[in-house]
Amino acid sequence: MSLQTEITKRQIASHRLGSLRQMKLDYQLYLIIVLPFAWLMIFQYGPMYGLQLAFKNFRIMEGIWGSPWVGFEHFIKFFESHQFVRVVGNTLWISFYELLAGFPIPIILALALNATMRTRFKLTVQFITYMPYFISTVVMVGIILQFLNPRIGIVNMGVGLFGMEPINFMGEPTMFKSIYVWSGIWQSAGWGTIIYLAALSAVSPELHEAATIDGASRLQRIRHVDIPGIMPTIITLLILNMGMIMGIGFEKIFLMQNPLNISSSEVISTYVYSVSLASSAPNYSFATAIGFFNSLVNLILIMTVNQIAKKVGETSLW
Amino acid sequence: MSNSKLALTRSDKIFYFFNDLFLLMALLAVLYPLIYIVSASFSDRLAVVSGKVVLWPVDFSLEGYVAVFKDPRILLGYMNTLFYTVAGTSINVVLTIMAAYPLSRKTMVGRNMIMYIFAFTMLFNGGLIPNYLLIKELGMIDTRWALLLPAGLSVFNVIIARTFYQTTISQELFEAASIDGCSHVRFVWNIVLPLSKAITAVLILFYGVFHWNSYFNAFIYLKSDHLYPLQIVLRDILVQNQIDPTTITDPVSMMRKQGLGELMKFSIIIIASLPVWIVYPFVQKHFVKGVMIGSIKG
């Protein structure tokens, strides 16, 4: 017993010495990483210090540290406000819409690209469908506005051909979510195929040959060879997407907002902005609390779906 | 894999026909809006506002482009963006490599811990207001630094680079070099960088496109017109609909004025996207490589 502890102690000691010696040997690695690490501490962990504002009433004169504590007041105010249901509802609705419509399309596109026998044609389709991904958010929204313009937009020219009155698409709250989601699909479905095409190219050719000899048609091979082959990739990406269901980015949706569609387009990230930096009576603490709530939900969501995936599908992000 | 020379069955022939038809439709759905924008930008202003442009330019004209270059905001924005892209990307690439190389060395004590500290920021961050207050506290509001330092590196790109180093630069290579007295710093400079030009290229591209296209930090942190990057100028013109009245000088009818405003927007869309699209054909395969390395779990 005592002998064993003695041995363990020695092992730990020698291991420590080993680590220390190794650290000495590799001291330059720490020297190299110190600069990016300092950046991380200042610009990523630094703002986390400011999160305490969520539980305080921010007063500019007294700074973050000196402002008085108020507990969960801001969170309760947010949960009880009529904005809560609307803003969280819009966020979830848009996310699920995006997931339902946007997730399968790159998979189908990748399967079709992988199956075609025309190589040049395949390269052309890839080249063109990747292009919109490099359009900036501002330009993308500019394009949407030009196309849907009630006076000069090409879409309304088409609507006019059917003898209908021009539609003010951007002013219709009911159309906002579809415009947001489908313009996103136009922009990134092609780019989204890359990851699946890589997975498809790793599917063993022997499986295809064996299936062909057994008389499987190309369509059956997609169903029984290609899709099972990329299933781990599909599940991994699905986890990632499920984890981001509350995390709609600010940039595109903010640019698409206007007073007419705001009831359908206000999401958590834009609401945070509108009650703080954009407001004439900014409430920094309230905004911090909403942002904090959102970040926490995102964190819990992604950890949960990852855990579920680990148990069910033996695939996980980490 | 599907290029077997066996005769196709009837059902396979039908499949390939519909498969290619589907791809053709996808191709046209993406291509048509792009062609329309290019054609509209080269058309006459009246043809644009009266809906005569359908596929090809109508009454070819360069008026839109001429008007765009008369707008001083655009030229200034272009120069500013050029600066932010070059300076920002340089900072990004240096910091990313400095983080990725140490984290790729399996002998590094505490490597996993440091990796977690980096990766956690992908899952959780302080949010808008704490970030804003930090930048304010650091005195960087309305300075060029606000566009360079807060976006110092992306942890996702660190992971891409780290995965690349792990798989291409073996531990034995460093051990062999270190026997000859080579330190880590010299090893990175003389051996790692020359051997990993591909990943450096990917990093430059990812960061470069990010800086060229981003507007959020400028929108939040900048107040002075003379610091604005192109994307903020574009937002004013394309989304906020602010046309500089001095660029429209001829005293003609309202319709013609509006027409030029709309025509200009199409030209601006092209001019703003052109640099990325010119580079894109040459670097497409690097982008693809970057996405594929990023998809490997490290």
Image (cartoon, helix red, strand yellow):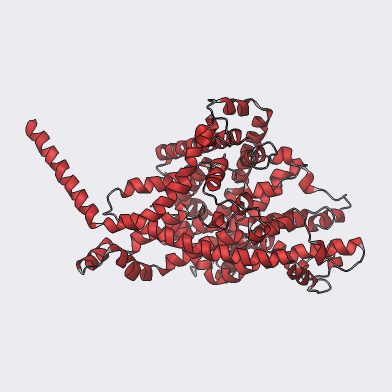
- Point out residue B180 in the picture as x, y percentages from the top left corner: 21, 69
Residue B199 falls left or right of residue A193: left
- Point out residue B147 in the picture as x, y percentages from the top left corner: 56, 56
- Point out residue B291 in the picture as x, y percentages from the top left corner: 48, 58
Image position of B69 with respect to A177: above or below:
below
Asked whether B135 or B154 is in front, the reply is B135
* Residue at the front extreme of this rendering: A61
Image position of A267 with respect to A196: above or below:
above
Which quadrant of the view contains residue B159?
bottom left
Residue B199 falls left or right of residue A275: left
Q: Quadrant location of the C terminus of chain A?
A: top left
Asked whether B56 or B268 is in front, the reply is B268
For the question of whether residue A208 can be seen, the reply is no
Residue B111 falls left or right of residue A225: left
- Point out residue A279 in the picture as x, y percentages from the top left corner: 68, 39
Which quadrant of the view contains residue B254?
bottom right
Asked whether A115 or B100 is in front, the reply is B100
